[in-house]
Each structure stands twice: as C-alpha cells, then as structure tokens.
Image: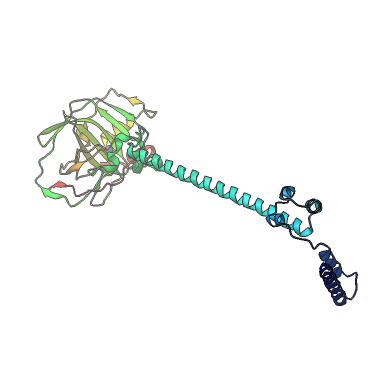
Amino acid sequence: MRNLIALLACWSAAHLISVANAADGAYGSPVANRFRANVDNIRPISPMKVGGGGGAASARGLSADEKVADKGKKARPLTEREKEEQAEAELQARIAEKVAAMKAQQAARAAAAAKAKKDAEARAKVLAMMPPPRANGTHWGYEGEIGPANWHKINSDWIKCSTGNRQSPIDIRDGMKVELEQIVFDYHPSAFNVQDNGHTVQVTMGGGNFITVGNRAYELVQFHFHRPSEERINGKGFEMVVHLVHKDGEGRHAVLALMLERGKPQPVIQTVWNNLPLEKGEVSAPSIVLDPNDLLPQRRDYYTFMGSLTTPPCSENVLWLVMKEPVQASPAQMALFSRLYPLNSRPIQPTSGRMIKESM
Ligand SMILES: [Zn+2]
C-alpha cells in the first residue's frame, strides 16, 4: 500500500513535469526549471518557519537535515528585490527620523517665539506702568526738531507747551467791548542792559518801573522782540512785536504787547540796537539810561485776556495786555533785527473759549 502511494506521488510529479514541458516547449526553459526546483524542495513545513524563529530549531526537535537547511537559508545572499525592500525600509526610517527631528525643531522654535512674545508683553506692561523718563533739555528754537511742536518733549517741565489750554499767542477776535480801566504807567528813565540770548534781543531793566492794572502793581523786568508779531488782531499779523514782561510781588506775570509797523524810527529801539553786544550770550551794560515811556503809543486802548509765556516753559496764568495802536519803527530798524532773527515767533494757539475783553 505504501508503495502504491509512492508510485502515485511519482507519477503525479512526472505528469506535472511533462505538462510543464509541453506548455513551455523545451525542458531547459526557466519555467520548467523553477517548477522542478519547487518539487525538489517539497518537504514538511516546520512550525518554527511560520513563527520565524529559526535560531531555536534544535530546541524544538528538528532533524539534522532540517538544521542544515535552516542554516543554508540564513546564509543565502539577499535577492535584488529583498535588497530593494531593505533599502526602501532604511530610507523610510531615515525620512521618518528626519521628519521627527524637523517637527521637534519647529515645536522648539514655536515655544521660543511664544516665550519671547510673552516676555515682551510683560516688559511693555511694566513700561506702561512706569512714568515716562524725565527730559531735561534746555536747547529750544523755532524750527525743526527743537521747534514749538516739540518743546514739551525737550524738557519735562515744559509740558504746558503741549497740554495747556490757556496758551499764547492767540488771534485776538470777538473781544467783549467794555469800559476797561486805564493801565497806569509808572515808568522812568532807567539803567538797562542788552543781550542777544539766542532766542531774541532782550533788554533787562533796572528796578522801579511799574504798571498798575486791576489794583495790582507789576514791575517791568525786561522787554524783547519777536518777528513776525506773535499775536494777531482779527487775523492780522504785524512785522514785529515788543513784549514788556512784568511781575508782581507774588511772581505773577503781566505782559504788555506793542505791535510794530513800518514808519518813522523808534528812539528806544535805536538805543537798544546801538548797544547790541558783538557776541551772542554777552551782556552789554551801557552807562546811559533808557525811558520805557518812549516806547508807548499815544492811545492806551488795549485788549486783555489770560494766556501764557510764549516760550518754554509756557507757564500759564499770565495776564496779557495788547495795545490796540501799533508803534512805528523804521524799515532799517526792522531790517537790522531780521538779520539776527528772521523768524522767532511761536504759532497761534487755540483760544479754547477764553474771554477776551477790549477797550470801547
Ligand atoms: Zn515774547
């Protein structure tokens, strides 16, 4: 019986070979060779092969032949396809590694950026709570970086130049016409000195010259010039203006403004020009006297309102008295000042609803 089974097996194998030959047409063809190799290799499948753990073959009771076959399998060189698969697997592993590294880098960068943003926000919060750094510059002018629009930034004590609501100069209009009391002038010929202080020509007066207005006496401290006039009257500007700065016993200011227009020579102005020092900052102290009465116009009607100094620190609570009648100065006297100061006027400031009174 066993022989019969063996015979049947042989026959079926031979039959299969002959079928393959017939299909291929030649015994040596690759298909036939492959088929024969497969038949030669027919043997029971070891359970270890399924699990892939060939190394433990002897422990599982494999035959000596099977051990040899197992070894032969291990040593077999890789086929092209296996090599390709292995290379591809390695490549994919490297790509995965690279992608993971890039992702980690991105995450680190994002975390660093988030931290930097948070830190910056925290710093900004702290800065916002701190008062702005104090500025203590003293160099100001009428144009550019140091011009009127930036005075408040130059020195922290000049903040009124920006935030004040009673600033000067203004365009004087819509005054309330009332019976204003006369300004009482108590001026005398006085010693004086002259200085070009870098902003204007300033004449500092010896003591004893007063005006009285509103039952209050103010002493003349100094007078100086602007070109063109800082104040305007109903929109009209003048070629120059003289500001006579007075102070009362409590330090309150009253500034009397005299508009200058072209006409005959002005004796006080001529005296001042005659005594101009050669250098800026120098003070000339002539041995002659000067009478400020000689500066005043005939008519003493005036406008009055509250305002400020028109130069830093732009202090407010200054009483302004602007004479309605302009004073004349010669074109040559005007020209001389314009060579020193072609422009030393602060622009017009908002009136902000303040009251303006004028003589009837
Ligand atoms: Zn002035």
Residue 47: x and y in percent read 70, 56
Image quarter of the N terminus: bottom right
Residue 263 visible in image:
no
Q: Position of residue 353 (x, y in %)?
A: 19, 50
| Any part of residue 58 in sight | yes
Q: Residue 274 falls in which quadrant of the image?
A: top left
**Residue closest to the eye, 40 or 135:** 40
Q: How many marks?
A: 0
Q: Residue furthest top?
A: 287
The answer to whether 200 appears left or right of 36 in the picture is left
Quarter, ligand 1 = top left
Instruction: Work out whether residue 305 or residue 123 is closer to the camera in this orientation and state it.
Output: 123
Task: Tell me the colour scheme of the image.
Answer: rainbow
Judge from the rendering whether residue 255 lies leftward or rightward of residue 40; answer left or right. left
Left or right of 190? Residue 147 is right
The image quadrant of residue 266 is top left
Q: Quadrant of residue 180?
A: top left
Image coordinates of residue 41 in percent, x first then y, are 81, 62
Left or right: 262 as drawn, with respect to 49: left
The image shows residue 11, relative to residue 267, as above or below, that is below
Q: Residue at x 31, y 28 (%)?
A: 194
Task: Decide which of 273, 153 is in the foreground and name it.
Answer: 153
Q: Residue at x 85, y 72 (%)?
A: 11
**Identity of the residue drawn at 37% across and 34% down:** 139
Image position, residue 103 (x, y; %): 56, 50
Residue furthest to the front in view is: 1
Q: Depth check: 3 or 166 in front?
A: 3
